[in-house]
Amino acid sequence: MLFYKNYYFFFMVFLFSAKILAGEVQNGEIQRVMVDTSLGNKIFLVIDSNDQSKASCHKNSKWSYVFPLTEEPSNKTLANFILTAHVTKVKVMAIGTGECSIFNELETLKRIEILR
């Protein structure tokens, strides 16, 4: 019985830690988008929202997320979502990877949803 209690405890810690580590923006609006060739093939974006969290590695106060531009179809689709949401000024939900490996102290974008 003690084994199951310990197993359940560690399972719950693991489940909640994944949510805490990644940044998330709820009901935000993309305010700014930048591509700078001197910084590599990356899209930088600012998402304005009152309901957001950041990954523990995220220390950049200017930008919300960074996203690598590659030739993969899924990356092109995500880039199109970002630009569409910015131009149309619709609300978005964004979720990061919880890591700042693409650009120092700036969380990498993993997912974006266009909301109504």
Image (cartoon, rainbow, N blue to C red):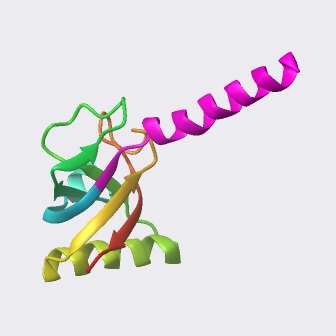
Residue 107 seen in this snapshot: yes
Q: Residue at x 25, y 47 (%)?
A: 52
Q: Which residues are magenta?
A: 1-25
The picture places residue 24, in percent across and down from the top left corner, at: 34, 50
Q: Residue 56 lies in what quarter of the image?
A: top left
Q: Could you tell me what secondary structure mostly forms the magenta stretch?
A: helix
Q: Count the marks: how many?
A: 0
Nearer the observer, 42 or 56? 56
The picture places residue 12, in percent across and down from the top left corner, at: 63, 33
Quarter of the image for the N terminus: give it.
top right
Residue 71 seen in this snapshot: no
Q: Is residue 79 above or below residue 108?
A: below
Quarter of the image for the C terminus: give it.
bottom left
Q: Is residue 51 above or below residue 60?
A: below
Q: Residue at x 44, y 36 (%)?
A: 20
Side of 105 relative to 96 (left or right)? left
The picture places residue 85, in percent across and down from the top left corner, at: 23, 76
The picture places residue 54, in percent across and down from the top left corner, at: 31, 39
Q: Residue at x 37, y 66 (%)?
A: 112
15 is within the stretch colored magenta: yes
94 is within the stretch colored magenta: no
Q: Residue at x 39, y 38 (%)?
A: 100
Outermost top residue: 2
Side of 27 relative to 57 (left or right)? left
Q: Residue 47 lies in what quarter of the image?
A: bottom left
